[in-house]
Amino acid sequence: METAHRVSPAILRNHLAFAPIVPIRLRTRVVPNTLMKKFNEQGLKSRAEQNFELFNALQKDRQGFNTLREMLHRWTGIHLTDGPASQLKMANRLTRVLCRHELRNYQQYAERLRAEKPGDIAEFVSAMTTNTTRFFREGSHFETLRTIMAEVIETKKRDKSHEIRVWCAATSTGEEAYTLAISVNEALHSEPDLKAKILATDIDLSALQRAATGIYSQERLAKLEPSLVRKYFSRCENADGEAHFQVQPQIQKMVHFAPFNLHTNPYPFERGFDIIFCRNVLIYFSQETAQKIIERLTGALNPGGYLFVGHSEVGYVRAAGLKMKEYSIYRKSA
Ligand SMILES: C[S@@+](CC[C@H](N)C(=O)[O-])C[C@H]1O[C@@H](n2cnc3c(N)ncnc32)[C@H](O)[C@@H]1O
């Protein structure tokens, strides 16, 4: 589980060429009037019209929605509430997937998913997960991390240990993991005997592949301090010649990306973590599932280790053995 999961540049180039499955939106194409007229005359429907019809039908299919909702919950722990808003969300995210496979309704799609082919499940999960993230998100966490790192460094020196272990448990496209690596690297600048390893996991393989490239558009870096951009990123270009930035190798080397489903039980780690970030993912689970995940995360922490959750996720944390150090930051009893 903890072996390095680096994706070769060739595979990534291929992957990116085939447009990742992540952001799924309904696209309507502008069809020239003459062509539209011809379509209408011939009684044919444009692709956009077909998609829109499918989207409308999916949005109303409550039974199919419930079948897929149940599958999503079983595989990922993600809980979609029952109701029109969730039906709209699912239709929005799955219309393109169904079109891609030339399926006409949720029933056909559920049948396909029941065969449990890894590629199909990965595509479904990727379409249904929300990957919103950014560098230094919830910035106060990284200010507190500075103090915590000073404490962790002292403990490691006292215990004559040379490794700090960090787990970024729902890393999405990597911004959070690299923010952690940059912050930890800053804290370790005068500690040559200490090394940090950051395990960065997510259930969404497509997001992980993007994360492993360490390449971000200028826009994604807009809120980063320019001094950090200069120090930790190198300018590069994408295939269209647009400016992008790649995380520098010394930071990339600190991070190991791997797929991991937080809904798994038990967690497979043989060694504990000093710090775990599990932010802005608990909100997608039911209270009961989130509670179990928090208990397993607590089990994966070293005594005295720290757990960070999203600012809006404090209500989910009720584990024995955790004390709130600061809002949304918890410490396991030493
Ligand atoms: C909104 S993003 C949060 C990213 C980052 N932690 C942050 O705070 O910026 C939520 C991430 O959780 C992942 N996720 C959802 N369910 C998961 C599960 N069961 N196991 C692991 N990751 C999951 C999604 O794929 C997505 O990338």
Image (cartoon, rainbow, N blue to C red):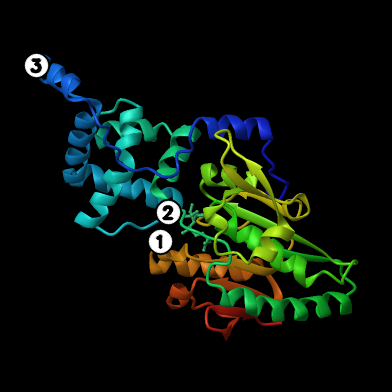
Q: Residues within 10 Å of mark 2 (few under 14, many from 20)?
A: some
Task: Please report whichever mark, 2 or 3, sits nearer to the chain's N-terminal start.
Answer: 3
What is the secondary structure assignment of the residue under circle 2?
loop
Label 2 CB sits under 8 Å from any ligand 1 atom: yes
Q: Residues within 10 Å of mark 1 (few under 14, many from 20)?
A: some
Q: Residue at x 26, y 44 (%)?
A: 91
Q: Quadrant of residue 162?
A: bottom right
Q: Residues within 10 Å of mark 3 (few under 14, many from 20)?
A: few
Task: Please report whichever mark, 2 or 1, sits nearer to the chain's N-terminal start.
Answer: 2
| Residue type at tag 2 | Thr
What is the secondary structure assignment of the residue under circle 3?
helix
What is the secondary structure assignment of the residue under circle 1?
helix
Left or right of 254: which side holds 15? Answer: left
Q: Nearer the viewer, residue 86 or 50?
A: 50
Q: Quadrant of residue 271?
A: bottom right
Circles 2 and 1: CB distance less than 8 Å? yes
| Residue type at tag 3 | Glu
Q: Which residue is mark 1?
A: 284
Where, quadrant-wise, is the C terminus in this rendering? bottom right
Percent x, y of residue 63: 20, 44
Q: Which residue is mark 3?
A: 41
